[in-house]
Amino acid sequence: MYHAPDLAALSGPAFHAELQAQLSALIAGERNALANAANCAALIFDQMPDLNWAGFYYLEPESGDLVVGPFQGKPACARIAPGKGVCGAAVVRGESLLVPDVHAFPGHIACDAASRSELVVPLRRDGHIIGVLDLDSPTPNRFTAEDQAGMERLMAVLMAAGQS
């Protein structure tokens, strides 16, 4: 059984270092990418304050669309076309996107009307984007540059863990 210490007292680099250590311990020895993504989404949602959605979208090779994967939060958009919303824009641009106010982002897709800010981090395998981590918050300006860097490192750990 996995037991995660509460990270509420930590912030910035200390928070992200501990979250990375927790993910590493949680997925140690597990090579199934779906299982690891599910546990990663649950860990982030449980430990990162002020989120209303944390999860993954994966590129579907046939259509090129992003299709919802493991997540925590309210039901989500099942499919996102390339270039659409923050997730689709992150894939097309090939980079993480930190959006302080989703209402100011052209083409934002409101799966949950309560979302006010968003952080999207591309998932890379063998140099190719295979999907994204999507984090939403009901608070404007919730995410920082440190959150972005921390989540990019966390996704590198997840991608290195397995790919079955």
Image (cartoon, rainbow, N blue to C red):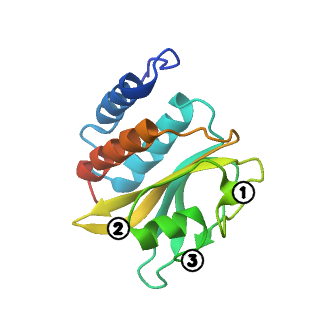
CB under 8 Å between discs 3 and 2: no
The image quarter in which residue 10 lies: top left
> Badge 3 is on which residue?
81
Tell me the element at label 3.
loop
Residue ID for mark 2? 129
Q: How many numbered dots are placed on residues in this image? A: 3
x, y percent for residue 94 = 38, 67
Among the two numbered marks 1 and 2 on one chain, the one whose residue lies closer to the N terminus: 1
Q: Element under label 2? A: strand
Are the residues flagged by discs 1 and 3 in contact, CB closer than 8 Å? no
Q: Give the CA separation, mark 1 to mark 3.
A: 19 Å
Q: Gap in Å between the C-alphas at discs 1 and 2?
A: 26 Å
Query: Which of the marked residues, 1 or 3, is nearer the chain's N terminus?
Result: 3
* Residue toward you, 5 or 135: 135
Which residue in the protein does label 1 denote?
103
Few, some or many C-alpha atoms within 10 Å of disc 3 (few <14, some 14-19, many ≥20)? Answer: some
Question: Which amino acid type is marked by label 3?
Answer: Ala
Task: Please say if 7 is above or below 75.
Answer: above
Residue density around tag 1, few if under 14, some if 14–19, many if 20 or more, within 10 Å:
some
Residue 20 location, x and y as percent?
Answer: 33, 33
Residue situated furthest front in the rendering:
104
